[in-house]
Amino acid sequence: MAVDQTVTLGKTTHGNLQKHRNPNKVQQWLITRFHHRVAKLIHQTRADVLLDVGCGEGFSLDHFVKDDLKIDYFGTDIRLDALQWARSNLFPTLAGSVADIHCLPFAKNTFPLVICLEVLEHLPDSTAGLVELARVSSEYLILSVPHEPYFRTANFLRGKHLAQLGNDPEHLHNYSGWAFRRMVSAVADVIWHGYTFPWQIVLARKRR
């Protein structure tokens, strides 16, 4: 779950790393529950290898390993320092590369499963990113974005991003369940669409 987070040496000020290392037990329970749901969907696809676009510091992979998910894993992120942090702190042998979601360095139909968690809401054109994800997938996509307006409301109620009424300043889009499903359906065939507060997840099949 990573795009454009600010990470400084010895200190996190915002974003993916801060979110996953926050000691708040409720937040950690919500994140763990979210990854359990994603792991079940990955298992459902029966894919033997996946590409995680926007893998950040590798926290999703860490959760999948804890869920005993047996799958080969390749990650890309736009930020080299995020991948370096992952290799230094979680997975020294992480197979990954720096790449832009809009121009992934893979041939079409390379991966049976492509996942992209908490990234699309950061893109000026989410659909353009989604089209590229579908291009490199040969079968399945698992995608997630915040479920609005609940994500913003939860932020506001806990005193976060008050000036933006709870909206994360890095989020360029705020997808309701209906809007997210409609966007994905324009590119791929939605198999399952569900919620794990405060996020929503889609399992889709590449359209032939």
Image: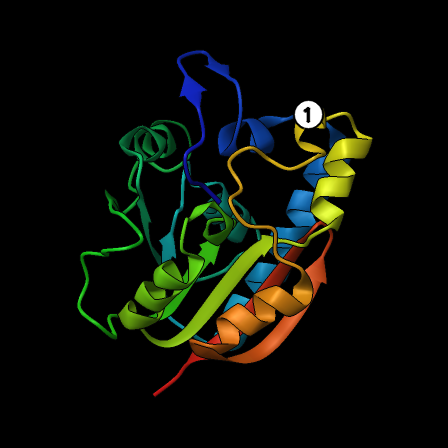
Q: Is residue 43 visible?
A: no
Q: Secondary structure at mark 1?
A: helix
Q: Residue 160 in the image: state x and y as whole percent.
A: 71, 27
- Locate the C terminus by quadrant: bottom left
Which of the two residues, 33 or 121, is positioned nearer the viewer here? 121
- Graded by Cα atoms within 10 Å as few (under 14), some (14 to 19) or many (20 or more), the crowding at tag 1 reads few
Q: Which is more toward the observer, 67 or 162?
A: 162
Residue at image x 70%, y 62%? 195
Q: Is residue 9 above or below residue 56?
A: above
Name the kind of residue labelled 1 in the image. Ala
When the figure is inspected, residue 140 is found, relative to residue 27, above or below; the finding is below
> For the view shown, which residue lies furthest in the top direction?
10
Provide residue 104's location: percent of width, then percent of height. 23, 56
Residue 27 can be seen in this image: yes
According to the picture, the residue beneath numbered tag 1 turns out to be: 163
- Residue 135 falls left or right of residue 86: left
* 9 over 14 or under it: above or below: above
When asked about the image quadrant of residue 90, the answer is top left
The location of residue 123, given as percent across then percent down, is 42, 49
Q: How many marks?
A: 1
> For the point 44% across and 78% down, which residue is it?
188
